[in-house]
Amino acid sequence: MIKHLLLVLTFFLSFMTTASDLYDFKFESISGQKLVLKSFKDQPILIVNTASMCGFTKQFDGLQKLYNSYKEKGLVIIGMPSNSFKQEYAEEDQVKDFCETRFNINFPMTKIVNVIGEDKHPFYRWLSDSYGVKPKWNFYKFFFNKKGEFVASFSSLTKPSSKKLLQLIEKDINS
């Protein structure tokens, strides 16, 4: 009886924590504050899994430039540091210091999250389950329009200054 009750309770709780859209997710920022995606409603959002010691780390420059160019028009960029590919510091303080001192990053960053594997963050599980996309390496980019709808993903090879990405941002901002 208890086993059956626990099974039902587990099923119910997993259903309750399953997000149905982008705005259901909450993160803790790298500085320890709440980062609630619902607070970015009606804004285009670019989410990027980052790593400080990756060959693509130079993309932080491009991401910051992109943010500087479009933040007044509503674009939100959220960096999600991850050690899933074994190229990130172990501590958030190290990541924060690295991003701020080396790249002057001032767009929102989350605490370190897993983006692949069994213990991946629920956001990345939702992304995979709902849209069939997942990061295959660091600096994968996921673009959501102002309505919170998933629009496209971009590999690590796609620079933040890519025409394809810029066109999607411009189109959404101007819609």
Image (spheres, rainbow, N blue to C red):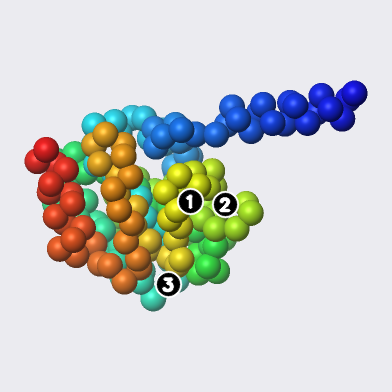
Do the residues bearing badges 1 and 2 touch, measured as CB atoms within 8 Å? Answer: yes
Q: Which residue is mark 2?
A: 120
Q: Identify the residue at image location x=21%, y=43%.
A: 75
Do the residues bearing badges 1 and 3 touch, measured as CB atoms within 8 Å? Answer: no
Q: Is any part of residue 76 visible from this angle?
A: yes
Q: Identify the residue at image location x=80%, y=28%.
A: 6
Amino acid type, mark 2: Lys
Amino acid type, mark 1: Ser
Q: Which residue is mark 3?
A: 54
Query: Would you say 91 lies left or right of 47 here?
Result: right
Query: Is 52 above or below relative to 104?
Result: below
Q: Which residue is mark 1?
A: 128
N-terminal of the pair, mark 1 or mark 3, is: 3
Q: CA distance from mark 1 to mark 2?
A: 10 Å
Farthest residue to the left: give it. Answer: 174
N-terminal of the pair, mark 1 or mark 2, is: 2
SS category of the residue bearing label 1 = helix
